[in-house]
Image (tube, rainbow, N blue to C red):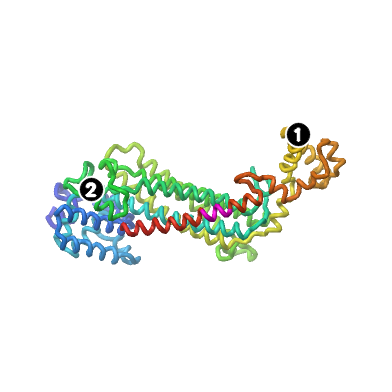
Amino acid sequence: MSEETQSGKMWSGRFREPLDPEFEAWQRSIVFDWQLLQQEVAASKAHASAIAAAGIVTAVELTQLRDALDAIGTEHVSKAGAAQVRDHATAEDIHHYVELALTEKLGPLALKLHTGRSRNEQIATDLRLYVREQAKLTIAALAEWCLALVGRARRAGDAVMPSYTHMQRAEPVLVAHWLLAYVEMLLRDVSRLEDCIARLNYCPLGSGAVAGATLKLDRSIAARELGFSAPTANSMDATSDRDFVLEYLQALTFVGLHASRFAEEITLFATAEFGFVQLPEAFSTGSSAMPQKKNPDLTELVRAKVGRIYGAAAAVTLQLKGLPLAYNKDMQETQEPTFAVSGTAQIVGLLARFTAALEFHAERMQDAAQDGFLNAMAAATYLVHKGVPFRKAHEKIGNAVRMALENKVELDGLSLEELRTIGEEFDADFYDSLRLEATLDCHDVIGGTARARVREALQDAENRVHALLAGNSRLEGALHAGA
């Protein structure tokens, strides 16, 4: 192998035979890790600062290196620039590409940059930066969706709908109560992503290939510049684990789960059989064959696309299972699943705008909430207040429901005389307990659907969502300042 050919590889000194061409093309990761260009540039600038502090490059050389790295990052922001990176003829990976591009700009000075570091720590750092950014974007999107849900709950006021268990009508609830259930789910999703960020936010730079850098680097320099909390504590762990990738993907599976549940409910509620919601035209399509159709494409696609998230988490679990310490090339395969879920924040953002545009058919929902004995639980509670043990109250109301079904009426259609054949505890005030407002307000506990409780819960949810939005802005500012 000629010296010229050998110089195209970062590791070629020990080798005399060229790579098998098919293997060489097959093992290159530049075809997907080009997406880490900005992270690689940022990490390289931070490493340049660390080796300058160690006396490997001068202050002038540091400026040249950092300026050239900035230029590389800027030149490839466009789609055409990104394609140039992805389709590069010889670069093995994003680290190799940046080194080649830097050499074109600076000549031999560029080769000093790799002093005291390994690609093992570079990819670990780049991925942490990428996952942190993506998690932050998803948190911001979740906050916007929460805001849309809270706003829609505020607009719903005291509108009522049936709740369901086993997909059968159960009890009346406020529409706001149903919407706030999703806010709670999404806020838990946010907390998982925040926990993930906190755990991954340590800088691998200075870990070397496996045992630590061979130069006495001040690792806090790179960690501080990149907005990490501190350097990683163990070089073998830092370069060889991808648990932060898996944790991120697993956190996203909860986001996907909740998005899919919401999508499924809206898809059902938009059918003529339910007729609870009006699909926004801006997020729906028609049929090429049936002129009357308005199809719930957004919610159907959300249900489908979350499969990628579950698949990515499962793939990375299997890729990491049983790997010995430290770095193994297997870890290269964890990158594509991570990139495959980059659309999660977009899915959530679309759901936020979709939710804000939803219209509810309040009368249809209220009619459904008053049909089919949804006040039976409240009726049983009435008897409990009359001193009847709940099990007996349950039985008596069950008998009343059967009598009403036979008479083809609701519970309030039974006469007092008929009710007293079931139990002498029934009195004229029984009918007040069956009113829609009473069936709501009897759930007067924290987390219940009583109207006063829901108003309190709505205010609390608004406060938490606005605190999240403010906190996310502060986090973003801090990370940008670090970078």
Q: Secondary structure at mark 2?
A: loop
**Quarter of the figure with the C terminus:** bottom left
Q: Say whether residue 204 is left or right of residue 197.
A: left
Give the residue pinned by disc 1: 388
Q: Who's the residue at 19% across and 63% down the image?
A: 63
| Residue 447 spot, x, y in % from top left | 60, 46
Q: Nearer the viewer, residue 420 or 358?
A: 420
Q: Is residue 198 above or below residue 392?
A: below
The residue that label 2 is drawn on is: 206
Q: Provide residue 106's location: percent of width, then percent of height.
A: 17, 63
Q: Residue at image x 38%, y 53%? A: 339
Magenta-drawn stretch contains 324: no
Q: CA distance from mark 1 to mark 2?
A: 72 Å
Foreground of the two, 6 or 361: 361
Magenta portion: prevailing SS class = helix
Residue 390 falls left or right of residue 255: right
Q: Earlier in the sequence, mark 1 or mark 2?
A: 2
Amino acid type of the residue that numbered disc 2 sits on in the rendered structure: Gly
Give the vertical position of 89 relative to 20 (above or below).
Answer: below
Q: Report whether residue 103 is seen.
A: yes
The amino acid marked with disc number 1 is Val
Q: Which residues are magenta?
A: 458-463
Q: Mark 1 and mark 2 in contact? Answer it, CB < 8 Å.
A: no
How many marks the image carries: the answer is 2
Label 1, secondary structure: give it: loop
Residue 365 on image: x %, y %: 69, 55
Q: Quadrant of residue 291?
A: bottom right
- The percent position of residue 142, horizontal first and vertical second, equals 48, 55
